[in-house]
């Protein structure tokens, strides 16, 4: 009894609650552990809601939402060890470190536990598959689509990126330029770099507003840049003339949506992510699907995913936030 | 060669600033329109404010690397208070910002004064502590535009006599600093302590206490700028103004304030900050590759400092002589 208490403490409150639950319930219920980077983060709380939704849909699934109290790999290893001791059926982890968790997760797989990573991946040897929230192609297409949707007549758009050397930003912008011919009339006039600093991004956005009097939209695929650009557009009195869009967080962009500086923006939806991770973990743990290159795994209302040669898959297009749903999400993440 | 023609370091810098503006105007004529110059001045206001405080510190042979972290921490605290208690009047928040900044400046000053630790070590340490504190109190979360009150965000933007309040604050600070440095014993003490600490001691000036006061001034300005910064950009997070302390030191050095202490003027600090401000605002509109932007900023700093070094070599003691006359 004493030992159980210690384990429960180590594994966190979520696990403690589930322990009490399982002792009474039949053992044939599949237990899927959603291990997050740290407890108390809005993004992951939302993912847990999605996981619960999937569990309800699947029926005989119990979600164990757990994680360390701070974003450390050591904390996650402790949590994973406790889950192995518990003999859960599947672990879906958003990792604080791609390599440090590998030994613990390997041990879990040796015991027959299904291990997948989502959001923030684990090295291939430490998991059966990894679920990315989206893919570079989908993101590149989404950011130009967000601008083009409000410009039926075509127009000038400019890109405000983070630093000129940021790999993810450059990849998204390259993917965006690839699909540019699909949006006739849309002209990308400039790409500037705000270095993910509020003041520099603000200044670069001001520069764009000055240099291109006909500018219709600013695309900022960075959460610092999009907020700064929206502020610069508002301060320049250009709301309604220049639409700021790109990738941002609802809590940070609520003001810009409210003021009209941004009509819409996108980011992955954590609820969908938690939902899909649970669906995949269930499919693999129950043997309905196998994690191998080329495998197609159905993920309920989100459709299906296809694993690539590294057993990685992209969930969906980034989710679009606008005035209609910002209030619902701004308190979540 | 030019050293003989140019009468003062400030005139040289003003000339360089004009040349820079003329160069930018050839690429983008709209840049030198009065409205845009006012905008650039307003954008440079935080740099001017911090450069003034830094100047006082550098005059006393110290350096304050914690200004940007101090700014970020006070900014975060007032923003969080504004969100948690929207009823707190703005005047109280601004007073709190200045007060907190002052306290953080005093902490630097006390360590330098009483424990005799080298200022660069003290402020490097407090810089990290202040940044870490922001993370601790905010949990790494942002304070966003829609959470802040309208009045909180509006003040730096409010226009009085054609200029935003933020610009007026910078102008007032420049005038106040000019008065303090040229018309008060404290101002004289800053120069004396930096020019020759031993002589200053013999003249009855407490070197440590003077340095402490310089840090306090610098902290107070950083605190005030913290509020202005957060309100202007309408966002507060751990990394705001990251690396800004280096811009502030660069503005001082470009402005001809000797890192060896004792030499420099308010006009120099102002021009140094404006020089950097113009470069920062001009590069985005003249459409230069971002990789060149970094190189150009860096080159401008080195050229300005090299010119200053030439000019100051023979002029290092003149201000002290002037100080003797004044005293």
Image (cartoon, grey):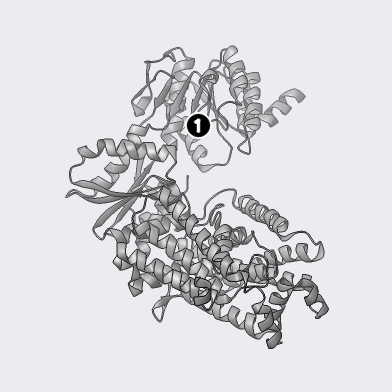
| B36 over A215 or under it: above or below | below
Q: Is residue B90 visible?
A: no
Is disc 1 placed on a helix, strand or loop?
loop
Position of residue B42 measured from the top left corner of the image (x, y, whole percent): 44, 70
Q: Is residue A26 at all visible to an observer of this figure?
A: yes
Query: Is residue B74 placed above or below B1 in the rendered structure?
Result: above
The chain containing the residue under callout 1 comes to A
Q: Quadrant of residue A200?
A: bottom left
For label 1, the residue is: A120
Binning the other alpha carbons within 10 Å of mark 1 as few (below 14), some (14 to 19) or many (20 upward) gives: some
Q: Is residue A180 above or below residue B215?
A: above
Residue B326: x and y in percent read 68, 87
Q: Nearer the viewer, residue A221 or B184?
A: B184
Residue A221 in which image quadrant: top left
Residue at horizontal 75 percent and vertical 59 percent from the top:
B118
Residue at (27% x, 35% y) in the render: A178
Say which quarter of the image contains residue B265.
bottom right
Vertical side of A219 occupied by B93: above or below? below
Residue drawn at x 24%, y 51% as measured from the top left: A156
The image shows residue B281 at horizontal and vertical percentages of 41, 62
């Amino acid at each position: 009894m004493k030992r159980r208490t210690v384990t429960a403490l180590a594994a966190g409150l979520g696990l403690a609650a589930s322990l009490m639950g399982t002792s009474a319930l039949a053992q044939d219920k599949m237990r899927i552990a959603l291990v997050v980077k740290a407890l108390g983060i809005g993004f992951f709380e939302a993912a847990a809601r999605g996981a619960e939704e999937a569990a309800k849909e699947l029926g005989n699934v119990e979600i164990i939402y757990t994680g360390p109290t701070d974003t450390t790999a050591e904390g996650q290893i402790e949590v994973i060890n406790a889950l192995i001791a518990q003999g859960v059926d599947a672990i879906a982890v958003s990792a604080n470190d791609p390599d440090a968790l590998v030994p613990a997760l390997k041990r879990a797989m040796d015991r027959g536990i299904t291990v997948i990573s989502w959001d923030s991946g684990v090295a291939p040897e430490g998991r059966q598959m990894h679920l990315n929230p989206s893919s570079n192609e989908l993101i590149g297409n989404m950011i130009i689509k967000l601008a083009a949707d409000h410009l039926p007549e075509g127009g000038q758009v400019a890109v405000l990126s983070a630093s000129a050397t940021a790999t993810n930003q450059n990849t998204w912008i390259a993917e965006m330029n690839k699909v540019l011919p699909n949006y006739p009339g849309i002209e990308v006039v400039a790409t500037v770099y705000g270095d993910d600093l509020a003041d520099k991004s603000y200044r670069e956005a001001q520069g764009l507003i000055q240099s291109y009097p006909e500018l219709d939209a600013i695309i900022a695929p960075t959460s610092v840049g999009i907020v700064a650009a929206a502020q610069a557009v508002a301060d320049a009195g250009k709301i309604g003339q220049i639409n700021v869009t790109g990738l941002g967080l609802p809590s940070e962009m609520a003001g810009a949506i409210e003021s009209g500086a941004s009509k819409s923006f996108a980011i992955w939806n954590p609820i969908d992510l938690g939902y899909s991770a649970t669906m995949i973990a269930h499919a693999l743990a129950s043997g309905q699907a196998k994690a191998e290159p080329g495998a197609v795994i159905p993920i309920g209302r989100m459709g299906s995913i296809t694993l690539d040669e590294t057993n990685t898959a992209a969930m969906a297009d980034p989710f679009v936030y606008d005035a209609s749903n910002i209030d619902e999400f701004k308190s979540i993440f | 060669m030019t050293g003989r023609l140019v009468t003062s370091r400030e005139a040289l810098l003003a000339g360089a600033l004009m040349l820079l503006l003329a160069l930018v105007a050839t690429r983008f004529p709209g840049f030198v329109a009065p409205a845009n110059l006012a905008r650039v001045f307003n954008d440079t206001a935080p740099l001017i404010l911090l450069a003034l405080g830094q100047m006082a510190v550098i005059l006393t042979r110290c350096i304050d690397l914690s200004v940007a972290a101090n700014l970020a921490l006070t900014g975060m605290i007032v923003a969080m208070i504004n969100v948690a208690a929207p009823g707190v009047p703005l005047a109280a928040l601004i007073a709190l910002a200045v007060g907190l900044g002052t306290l953080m400046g005093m902490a630097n000053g006390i360590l330098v004064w009483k424990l005799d630790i080298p200022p660069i070590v003290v402020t490097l340490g407090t810089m990290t502590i202040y940044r870490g504190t922001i993370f601790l109190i905010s949990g790494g979360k942002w304070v966003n535009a829609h959470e802040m009150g309208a009045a909180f965000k509006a003040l730096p933007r409010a226009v009085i006599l054609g200029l935003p309040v933020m610009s007026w604050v910078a102008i007032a600070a420049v005038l106040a600093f000019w008065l303090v440095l040229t018309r008060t014993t404290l101002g004289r003490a800053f120069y004396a302590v930096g020019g020759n600490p031993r002589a200053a001691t013999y003249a009855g000036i407490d070197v440590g206490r003077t340095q402490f006061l310089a840090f306090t001034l610098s902290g107070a300005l950083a605190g005030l700028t913290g509020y202005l910064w957060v309100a202007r950009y309408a966002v507060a997070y751990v990394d705001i103004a990251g690396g800004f302390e280096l811009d502030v030191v660069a503005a001082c050095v470009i402005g001809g304030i000797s890192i060896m202490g004792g030499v420099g003027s308010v006009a120099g600090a102002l021009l140094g900050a404006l020089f950097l401000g113009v470069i920062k605002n001009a590069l985005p509109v003249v459409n230069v590759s971002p990789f060149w932007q970094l190189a150009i900023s860096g080159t401008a700093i080195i050229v300005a400092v090299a010119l200053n070094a030439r000019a100051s070599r023979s002029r290092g003691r003149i201000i002290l002589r002037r100080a003797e006359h004044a005293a």
